[in-house]
Each structure stands twice: as C-alpha cells, then as structure tokens.
Image (cartoon, rainbow, N blue to C red):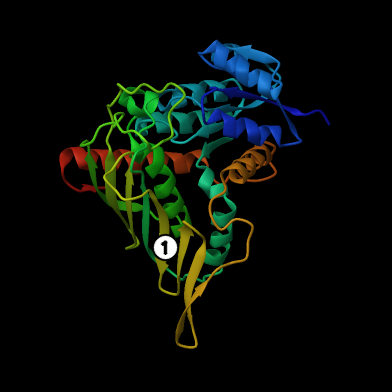
Amino acid sequence: MSKLKIGVIGAGSISEAHLNGYANNPEVEIYAICDLNEERAKLKAQKYGVTHVFTNYHDLLALPEIHAVSICTWNNTHAELSIASLQAGKHVLCEKPLCKTVSEALEVEKAVKQSGKVLQVGVVRRYGQNTQILKSFIDQGDLGEIYYVKASCLRRLGNPGGWFADEKRSGGGPLIDLGVHLIDIGWYLMGMPKVKSISGNTYKKLGNRANVQNLSFYKAADYDPTLNGVEDLANALIRFENGASLFVDVSFTLHAKEDELSVKLYGDKGGAELEPELMLVTEKNNTIMNMTPQVDNLSFDFASAFKSEVAYFIDASLGRKTTLSPVADGVEMMKILTGIYESAERGEEIRFS
C-alpha cells in the first residue's frame, strides 16, 4: 500500500512536533511543506526529507495527491487555511486554538460539514497517555460526579515574544495559548457540560520583561522583544448548567517563586491530579487513599502525545476512528475563550443562553 502524502503549512516551532509525529508514522510520507519564510521551510524540508517546498499555501493545496494537512501557523490564519484546505478536499489537523473568534469557528464548522472531511483540533493533551488513563477511571465511575476542576499554568518569565505577543496575530496571550489546553482538558474530563456563565479577568502589568537576565525562557521563532500587546495573566471561573465549575489561571510572566503546572479534579466519589503527576484519591475502609498508577509517564509526555495525536488523525481521516477533538468542540472552546476576554473587558459575568 502506498503511503498517504501529508502537507504541513507553517514551519515555525510547533511544526517540529507535527513533523516528528508524521515521521514516526509508517503509513505517511511528509510530502510538502509551506512557510512564508522560504529559508525556514527549506531547512525543515531538508531535515525531514520533504520533496516539495512552497511559500504560498494555495500551491501546496493544489497538489491532488495530498491526503491531509497540518496547520501550524499564526492563530489569525487558522480559519482561512482550514477552510481553504477543506474546500481543496484535504483532511485537516489544525493547531489549537481553532481560530480567533466564534464567527470564524462557525465558518470552519460549516466548511467541515460541506466537505465531508475530518478536521481535528490540535488540543494534544487529550491524546496524552496520562489523560487517557485518567479518563478510563472516570468512565468507570471511580471519581463519581466531577463537580470542580482547578487548573493552573503559571510562568514566572515566559512571554515568547514574536507573534505570541502580537494580539492581531495571536488573538491574546497566555489565555488563548496556554489556557486553551487547561480549560479544554478539564472540560473534556468533566464530560464537556454546557457552559452557563463565565467570570474572567485579564491583567497587563509586567510586560514582556525582556530586561530580565540569568533566567532563560521559551522564545518564538520570530522573537521580537519590542512586541508587548497581550495580557500577562488571566483567570476565570466557568460555571456549567449541571452545577459544576472550573477555575483556571495562566500567565506568561508573574512575580512568582517558581513555575507552576497543575490540573486537579474533584468528584463525589474520588479526586485526581493530572498534572504535575497523575494520581487518584479515594476512600477505602474509612481511610483516604492516595493511589499512583504504575505507568510509563505519570506526567504529560510531549513527544508521545503528538505521536498519538497524529496517529489518531490518520485513523480518523481513513474512517477507522472518530477524532477525540472534533470541530464542534473547537467551536465551544472559542465561545469559552472569547467569553473570558469579554467578561474581563466588561468587568462583569457573562451568561450564556
């Protein structure tokens, strides 16, 4: 059987994870890569043995042999590229977030329905081993009714600069970059209840702190220390129609002692921590028990999760599985993210009908 030919649009930092995922999949061939920066595209092509290099995505999509594409570009291009790819008859793996606005998300959803193709939203944490192990316990009822989730991703110094710090291209700061992962994974594990209301806050107090020395941090491929157009910190309380709630706080930069990553779930039969390490809490013989599974990775493993995400995408594109992160979930996540920003701007709770 000949290999499925894959195209990757965008050759920035996150494309490396997609390219590695495809390179480790025996069913596919990375056939084409596109980036506005031709030199960057050529370097990635050389590394992964890609034979077709473009600077115009229309040229890539015009190749009839392309089965599917990954979209790894600025957030403000996700909708345009997804719709064009679907209309060209390609299956799409689109990096999170799906886009910048709810109206864009609905247009993408419409294009998915019209094309009959698969669009998988790249919320990679759904595909992590630790997530799927915890979900198996949840599905068996070990946590009971999950009524509260608390999630944090706080960076002391981590504004990546570049397009991440440009609101026109990114749509926002740590909320839309980091918060999307935390909110999505909490909501997913809760069973994706319908949102009732959102109360959010955003803060622009510290800037990009490019002056700080002696502490390294992740920088975008197009890092520019002068860009500083997004929030430093965001937090939100999301209430659901079933009475459950989710609290999230995320930052690019914060006067904190250390970085923090945590995802905690609380149910009426048990609790769990997904990050920093997977563990469960329950009661037995009138004693509270902390349980640690014996698994390969108690924490989120970046490389293996992307490998799993890509494999799931290929299976979904061939009709062998249903994607774990369909476009409909991407639409709902855009409603939540934009609802948080709207609540913060208005200084009041946002209610959903």
Residue under the point 58% across and 30% down:
16
Residue 13 visible here: yes
- Lateral position of residue 122 relative to residue 236, left or right: right
Rendered position, 52 above or below 98: above
Q: Which residue is the extreme one toward the bottom?
A: 285
Q: Where is residue 240 in the image (x, y as percent from the top left)?
A: 33, 56
Rendered position, 316 above or below 139: above
Residue nearer the viewer, 174 or 154: 154
Question: Which image quadrant for residue 52?
Answer: top right
For label 1, the residue is 265
Q: Position of residue 202 (x, y in %)?
A: 24, 41
Question: Which image quadrant for residue 54?
Answer: top right
Residue 353 visible here: no
Q: What residue type is labelled 1?
A: Leu
Residue under the point 42% across and 63% down:
265
Residue under the point 67% across and 18% down:
46
Q: Where is residue 238 in the image (x, y as percent from the top left)?
A: 30, 53
